[in-house]
Image (cartoon, helix red, strand yellow):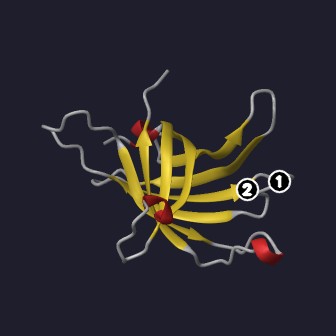
Amino acid sequence: MDTVELTGTYTYRSFLNRPEPVDDFNKLRFAQLELRLRAEPDGVLGGALVFSEEPGGETIAMDMTGRASGVSPLAFTLTGRGRPDSPIADFHYEYDGIVLRHWETGIGQRMTLAGTVLRAEDHGSGASLARAGQTASFLAVKRDTA
């Protein structure tokens, strides 16, 4: 797989790593966002993890930077940092992932990125303080191109 094939828009979902069964799948939910990636032929990655985007308003997003390797399975690392002067300016997350296997006989299969995410620094304060060290698993499913 060529690293430039990572370029695109994905539906990103992350899940808390709870080992016990849950009666409500939302108890596993960490985030559901939009991941926009662009990949260069040399494996350099850039883009944004978009939290919200209002027409004519502010886009709240983390800027994503990273690198992909051209081996199989294709692996990548990303760093996400909140944009300056935004409500998430103090966000810093690290991502480590792979592109999941494409089954030759699969029906309706989409490119899917999978891996782990780490909250690399504390963010927020007081009752809304989110401590560094929290981890989650993620899947990002590539959308159709417009």
In screen coordinates, is 141 left or right of 117? left
Element type at marker 2?
Answer: strand
- Tell me the quadrant of the picture where the N terminus can be found: top left
Q: Give the residue type at disc 2.
A: Gly
* Residue that appears at 37% across and 56% down: 98
Residue on which the image places disc 1: 84
Q: From the viewer's side, name the closer residue of 30 and 43.
A: 30
Farthest residue to the left: give it. 105
Q: Nearer the viewer, residue 105 or 68?
A: 105
Query: Where residue 21 sits in the image (x, y, percent)?
Result: 35, 72
User: Which dot marks residue 82?
Assistant: 2
Q: Residue furthest right?
A: 85
Q: Can you give x and y, in whole percent of width and height, for residue 69 in the image?
A: 40, 54
**Tag 1 secondary structure:** loop
Task: Answer with left or right where residue 81 lies relative to residue 67.
Answer: right
State the separation of the CA atoms marked 2 and 1.
Answer: 6 Å
Quarter occupied by residue 130: bottom right
Q: Are marks 2 and 1 in contact (CB under 8 Å)?
A: yes
Q: In which quadrant of the rendered view does residue 123 lie?
A: bottom right
Q: Provide residue 47's location: percent of width, then percent of height.
A: 61, 43
Left or right, 99 with respect to 51, comes to: left
Q: Quadrant of residue 109?
A: top left
Q: For this view, does 105 lie left or right of residue 52?
A: left
